[in-house]
Amino acid sequence: MLDVNPPTRRPRVARALITAAAAAVLAAAALTAPSPAGAAVSRAELALRWAPIHYQDVDATGGHALSGQSDYLTRVDFDGDLDGRNNWDRAGQAGASLAAHAYYSVVETSTHWYITYFFFHPRDWTDHPFFETEHENDGEGALFAIERDGSAYGVLRSAVTVAHSDFYSYTPSGSTWTSGGESIDGTLRFEASPHDTFQHPVTAQEAQGHGLKAHPQYDINGDGLVYYPSTVAETPSSGNDRDVRYQLIDIFAAGGLWAQRSNASLFASLGTFAGDTSGDCGAGTWSCSTNSANAPWGWDDGNDAPARGEIASDPAKLSAAYFTVPTALARTYSYNPYAGAAAALAEAARTAPPTVD
């Protein structure tokens, strides 16, 4: 890992971070060696193969921008702890790591792999004084559905992205999936990576609020970063660095994000990050809201049939609702760690306030 370690840390948090870091290092090491001929690829290899080339617009104006660093991707524990309520303040402090990371989870059925990618920013911010809010922490991302067609990595059929409290659906050129309960919002395009031999899907996030769509529905406007999936994490050299490698972290890793879901320092409720109004959050803007960012199991488009969090926890259901799929689409999971918390997730979906990220 390329993140720096702070000199002091509570023992319990240190053990959790060391465990998660060790799991990430082992996963990265596994990816450096190809699988034996005929062997099934690992979930980590699958996630790395389909991880998007990611365009991040950067805005350096205003004090809350931190000269553009508020738009950098990083880890949830970029400041060395698992306290969600100090992330706004620590984003601008010396010693915090802005090395590029993204999170992923893989769930499986007999017919498809579903990979959720989660991009974290310590701040959802604005430089406008009127009618716009900001908040501590920001989490948006995408779901990719990959058909298991007998090839090593399958074929990507669709993407659904998260932009605040709305989902947007896409298919690559030539996909057999078509519009279903939701209209397809555009074409998911691909680019070659200079760091491997694959064509990767291309996504993009806006500056400040970090809504995520397929590129170029969002794009870099002036300064910006282009992130490439890798087994190492690089820190951008500036707010206009067009080749930054990011490292993937398994949400289901031992001591990882899913394991921390009941950590009251990190989460205010199931799927919702804890965030307060400390520091200058809201200063010079309309307001600063609390507990407003969500992990994938808290993502929700309140106008659609799938429930809160099901984009990650039951992606086959969401795919069947959003798209018309001409081939078999199994609904029983052979691997889905989210399922162990099904009752709690359903209760959160029933009782949680509307998503406002």
Image (tube, helix red, strand yellow):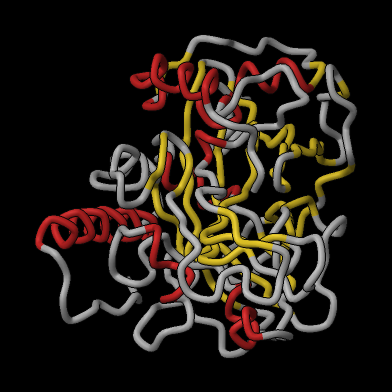
Q: Quadrant of residue 95?
A: bottom left
Q: Which residue shows up at 52% across the image and 59% down it?
A: 137
User: How many numbered tags mark residues here?
Assistant: 0
- Relative to 171, does residue 317 appear above or below in the rendering? above
Q: Percent x, y for residue 157?
A: 73, 32
Residue 143 position within the rendered picture, expressed as x and y whole percent measured from the top left = 63, 38
Give coordinates of residue 9: x percent, y percent: 17, 70
Indicate left or right for 91 with 202 as reference: left
From the viewer's perspective, is residue 310 above or below residue 117?
Answer: above
The answer to whether residue 38 is visible is no
Q: Position of residue 243 (x, y in %)?
A: 63, 79
Left or right, 23 with respect to 216, comes to left
The answer to which quarter of the image holds residue 1 is: bottom left
Closer to us: 1 or 40: 1
Residue at image coords 72%, 64%: 286
Would you say 105 lies left or right of 82 here? right
203 or 287, nearer to the observer: 287
Q: Nearer the viewer, residue 4 or 51?
A: 4
Quarter location, residue 343? top left
Q: Residue at x 13, y 57 (%)?
A: 15
Residue 224 makes an appearance in the image? yes
